[in-house]
Image: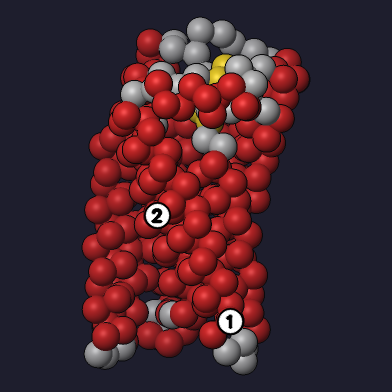
């Protein structure tokens, strides 16, 4: 459906979808506002802070775009029938943003390891970006081939990265005092729980879809690239988005807030 018609139909869709989309739009506005506020107030005295701010800006901007133009890659599902909803465009933007976030985490973990004197944590910092690149490769394989097992592997790799980030927050909590320790403990708990939920919910969801063959098709990578550029199925059916809404909401809230927090830590 045309973009304009989609707006007209919004008054007739399931109110749960309307509430969710409103929440995503609110998150996009909030996150942009938070980044601008941080950029105006944080002193850019070190290359570390300046780099974190730049990487966070990319991640926040892409997440705002994805909030406004959500999509389900393998099923080629989107909300708006516009070129901005093209699967290949959204996946490319997400890849850039997620690599920026992985680099943010690596810089933070490396700094924590140096401060706390933990060589094992320093080694894990060097693994962040390579693991993220591997996750993006298998994600692209899934998107182009329509094989959900790629997404299951990707989410498993991100769960490992979350555990590494949780360990870094925990180590940092031992090295600082006062309110900063509370923040670090919260980060440790959030990403420890996040890793467990990713394995228990997201990975299981993609394995189930792989077994059921819900994509319905199977492509070569070249054919899949062409298909991801042109094919999309705009829909406002809540049943289509219901299973995607939880992970997207957490991704565009806690994930983005972590990226912002890493500028300040």
Badge 1, how many Cα within 10 Å: few under 14, some, many 20+? few
Element under label 2? helix
Q: Which labelled disc corresponds to residue 253?
A: 2
Write the residue at 63% across / 37% down: 90
Residue 168: give x, y in percent of width and height: 37, 70
Whether tag 2 and tag 1 are in contact, CB under 8 A, the answer is no
Q: Earlier in the sequence, mark 2 or mark 1?
A: 1
Q: Residue at x 52, y 35 (%)?
A: 70
Tag 1 residue: 40
Q: Which quadrant of the rendered structure holds the N terminus?
A: top right
Picture layout, residue 209 above or below residue 202? above
Viewer-side residue, 82 vs 130: 82
Is 54 left or right of 245, judged from the image as shown?
A: right
Instruction: Specify the quadrant of the image occupied by residue 199.
Output: top left
Is residue 155 visible from the viewing direction of this image?
yes
Q: Is residue 209 left or right of residue 134?
A: left
Q: Position of residue 264 (x, y in %)?
A: 47, 80
Q: Residues within 10 Å of mark 2 (few under 14, many from 20)?
A: some
- Does residue 132 appear to the left or right of 190 in the view shown? right
Relative to 127, does residue 47 appear above or below in the rendering?
below
Q: CA distance from mark 2 to mark 1?
A: 21 Å
Q: Is residue 142 visible?
A: no
Kind of element beneath mark 1 = helix
Along the line of sight, the residue nearer the viewer: 7 or 83:
7
Could you say where residue 261 lies in the image, as x and y percent from the top left? 43, 72
Q: Residue at x 60, y 51 (%)?
A: 62
């Amino acid at each position: 459906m045309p973009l304009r018609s989609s707006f007209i139909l919004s008054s007739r869709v399931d109110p749960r979808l309307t509430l969710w989309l409103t929440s995503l739009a609110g998150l996009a506005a909030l996150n942009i506002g938070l980044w601008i506020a941080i950029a105006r107030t944080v002193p850019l005295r070190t290359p570390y802070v300046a780099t974190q701010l730049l990487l966070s800006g990319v991640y926040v901007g892409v997440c705002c775009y994805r909030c406004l133009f959500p999509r389900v890659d393998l099923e080629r599902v989107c909300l708006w029938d516009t070129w901005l909803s093209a699967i290949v465009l959204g996946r490319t933007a997400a890849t850039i943003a997620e690599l920026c976030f992985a680099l943010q985490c690596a810089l933070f973990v490396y700094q924590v390891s140096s401060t706390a004197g933990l060589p094992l944590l320093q080694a894990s910092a060097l693994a962040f970006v390579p693991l993220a690149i591997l996750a993006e490769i298998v994600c692209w394989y899934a998107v182009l081939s329509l094989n959900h097992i790629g997404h299951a592997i990707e989410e498993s790799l991100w769960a490992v990265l979350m555990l590494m980030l949780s360990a870094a927050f925990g180590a940092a909590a031992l090295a600082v005092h006062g309110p900063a320790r509370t923040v670090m403990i919260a980060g440790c708990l959030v990403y420890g729980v996040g890793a467990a939920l990713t394995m228990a919910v997201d990975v299981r969801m993609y394995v189930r879809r792989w077994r059921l063959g819900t994509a319905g098709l199977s492509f070569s990578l070249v054919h899949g690239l062409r298909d991801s550029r042109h094919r999309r199925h705009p829909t406002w059916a809540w049943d289509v988005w219901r299973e995607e809404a939880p992970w997207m909401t957490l991704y565009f809230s806690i994930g983005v807030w972590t990226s912002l927090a890493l500028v300040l830590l």
